[in-house]
Image (cartoon, grey):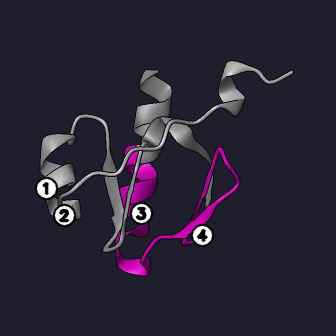
Amino acid sequence: SRGLGDVYKRQIVNGTLPDFEKTYSDFLLRIHAGFLINPECVRKIERFTVTMSNGAKLPVPEKKYTTIKRLILTNLQSN
């Protein structure tokens, strides 16, 4: 049997990452030119890599790492 966490809804949407970043800035965080994430879905952040709850490992640029880490940790502490 599958729990609710095992079911994912997929949607095809039109738009650019900057559009989504602007529209959903309260929920999403830009960690890289090609990645917007939901900080609540971060399992771990370590040197230049964010590991998501689904196991995906995403790169974080060296120049942005400290800022991104601070934003993610602040978000985790506030929830």
Q: Secondary structure at mark 4?
A: loop
User: CA separation, marks 1 and 2?
Assistant: 5 Å
Q: Which residue is mark 1?
A: 19
65 within the magenta span: yes
Q: Which residue is mark 2?
A: 16
Three-letter residue code for mark 2: Thr
Three-letter residue code for mark 1: Asp
Q: Which residue is mark 3?
A: 66
| Contact? badges 3 and 4 (CB < 8 Å) | no
| Contact? badges 1 and 2 (CB < 8 Å) | yes
Q: Which comes sooner in the sequence, label 1 or label 4? A: 1
Three-letter residue code for mark 3: Thr
Q: Secondary structure at mark 3?
A: helix
Three-letter residue code for mark 4: Arg
Q: Which residues are magenta?
A: 48-71
* Residue 6 left/right relative to 26: right
